[in-house]
Image (spheres, rainbow, N blue to C red):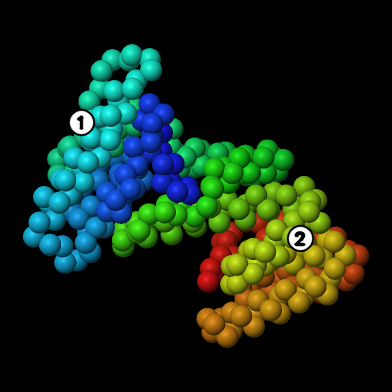
Amino acid sequence: MDIEVLGVLKVRENGILVTPTAPKARQVLAMLALRADHLVPVTELIGELWGEEPPRSARTTLQTYILQLRERISAALAHDPEGAAPRTAKDVLVTSSGGYILNTSGGRSDVREFERLAGMGYRSIDAGDFAGAARRLREALALWTSSALADVHAGGLLETEVKRLEETRLCALDQRIEADLRLGRHRELLGELTVLVSRYRTHETLHGQLMLAYHRSGRRSEALDVYQRLRSTLVRELGLEPSSRLRRVQQSILAAGPGTALDAGLLAGGERLSRVG
């Protein structure tokens, strides 16, 4: 079974799409897909579908959605092109101790692949291999086609999972940009970073990276303007001053003067500057 959640929800068995069109059945499949090969308790599925006040028929209705999913899986299993050992829908969507498990049988999951590639990228940064880090993190980020589960109506639990995934995406993105800065690609990053800071208006790491990219491109005054705009936003919207590390970046730019290069490692290490609004 192949699972894609880093965009629209797509679940395939034998290459055949088994994703249902009914909104609540899609929610159930999304929960199972996000935790593929792990138990998802019935109580959590009910909570996702109906919140804190489920109807009396909740368990029966959930069983109906599971049956619908198994019917789609069974139809896909009937088209096994390799004639492998027979599997049933209950082997794929397993009932187990108070919940259900979506058994991928070693299939592909874009979340697992993203985490594998991102982890390799982070380790490359730690080892000082910035070219390798940039390459692997680009590969990881290329798995995202849009926001996670973009076409699934999310209840409370799925919404939390989507936010967690989006935060891992943002972390991989700022680490990839850091690797590119270390490689001297500051001019190439200006356009991308300008878009990102307008989208993440209080994310300090991205603003700091744009400051460095501007300064290293000979645009010192614009680098300092980025800091002032961020400070105004933080004070106005959150009642906060920029972090000490971002202030150090500003002070380094002021002290360096025009035409003096600054180390891209100014933003590296320690806590991430990631207030996100």
Determine whether, in the image, residue 20 is placed left or right of residue 237: left
* Residue 221 image label: none
Give the image location of residue 31, x and y in percent: 31, 48
Q: Quadrant of residue 157?
A: bottom left
Q: Residue at x 41, y 46 (%)?
A: 9
Residue furthest out toward the right: 259
Q: Is label 1 in a helix, a strand or a loop?
A: helix
Vertical side of 140 occupied by 187: above or below: below
Instruction: Categorize mark 1 by other alpha carbons within 10 Å: few (<14), some (14-19), many (20+).
Output: some
**Label 1 is placed on what type of residue?**
Lys
Instruction: Quadrant for the N terminus, please.
Output: top left
Q: Name the residue that disc number 1 marks.
A: 90
Residue furthest out toward the left: 56
Q: Residue at x 61, y 40 (%)?
A: 139
Which of the two discs, 2 and 1, sits closer to the camera?
1
Determine whether, in the image, residue 97 is placed left or right of residue 130: left
**Label 2 is placed on what type of residue?**
Leu
Q: Quadrant of residue 68?
A: top left
Visible residue check, residue 186 = yes
Q: Residue at x 67, y 44 (%)?
A: 134
Q: Residue at x 58, y 72 (%)?
A: 202
Q: Name the residue that disc number 2 marks.
A: 190
Give the image location of residue 23, x and y in percent: 30, 54
Q: Is label 2 in a helix, a strand or a loop?
A: helix
